[in-house]
Amino acid sequence: MFFNQYILETSGLPQEHEQLKQLREKTVQKYGDMSVMNVPVDEAQFISILLKVMNAKKTLEIGVFTGYSLLATALALPPDGKVTAIDVDRETYETGLPFIQKAGVEHKIDFIHGDAFSAINALIDGKQEESFDYVFVDAVKEDYIKYHEPLLKLVKKGGLIAYDNTLWLGSVAMSEDDIEMTDILRHNRKPLREFNTFIANDTRVESIILSVGDGVTLCRRL
């Protein structure tokens, strides 16, 4: 939409951290169209402000790719803050690692290479229930509902879980037989619609869908 470019030019790009800029450019250079798997600039800046307002110190990220949102999170956390990041793809994480190192925040990151469900269960088994201030999920959309239950055990009361891409380019508001809907839009439309409805009716959280980036659903644990 036309205002996205205005947001980028007026607020997003002028305030983008130099290492985030370089990481974004490297991701586009190396991965082309797949670079959209990273969050957009304005969404990363929203997350940064949110974490600072919350005074978050311990966070969790599920789905890292090259680490744009991870770097934005690490930069926003205080010097003694920690972010646990989980992804099955070490190679993509290592693409962004030099920029994380240049930004001086590698010590804040604990990267877990492996399956997210196994890693989450290990955190629960490791007595880390109700210890995370904030969780960011940007992974397989069909698994969002499955992530929700164990993540509620890990996040503190009053803490936030953020799920990315919950508007899925607006397809969640489209008709199933919309002729302009591509296969990839159609594939994730149904599970995301089900997830959005599930969250809206979950009395354990206070939630909202924000039209930031490709849609972010925020859940505050009650």
Image: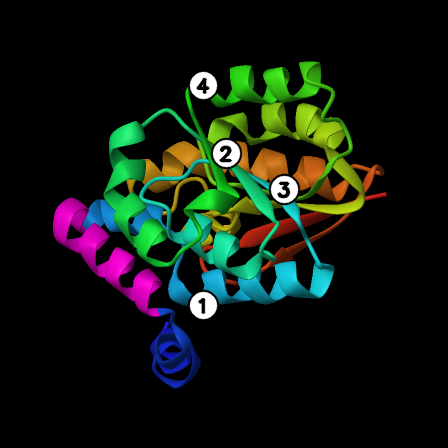
Q: Which residue is mark 3?
A: 196
Amino acid type, residue under disc 4 in the picture = Asp
Name the N-terminal-most of marks 3 and 2.
2
Magenta segment: does it hold 111?
A: no
Q: Residue at x 27, y 58 (%)?
A: 24
Q: CA distance from mark 3 to mark 2?
A: 10 Å
Q: Residue at x 47, y 44 (%)?
A: 107
Q: Which residue is mark 1?
A: 42
- In the depicted structure, whether residue 126 falls above or below residue 46: above
Please tell me in which quadrant of the rendered image residue 115 appears.
top left
Farthest residue in the bottom direction?
10
Q: Residue at x 70, y 25 (%)?
A: 149
- In the depicted structure, whether residue 83 falls above or below residue 91: below
Task: Tell me where the magenta segment starts and ends, as one range.
Answer: 18-32
Amino acid type, residue under disc 3 in the picture = Asn
Label 2 secondary element: helix
* Label 2 with label 4: CB-CB less than 8 Å: no
Name the N-terminal-most of marks 2 and 4.
4
Q: Residue 16 versus residue 109: which sits nearer the camera? A: 109
Q: Which residue is mark 4?
A: 115
Viewer-nearest of discs 4 and 3: 4
Q: Which residue is mark 2?
A: 190
Q: CA distance from mark 2 to mark 4?
A: 24 Å
**Most common SS among magenta residues:** helix
- In the depicted structure, whether residue 124 falls above or below residue 172: above
Q: CA distance from mark 1 to mark 4?
A: 29 Å
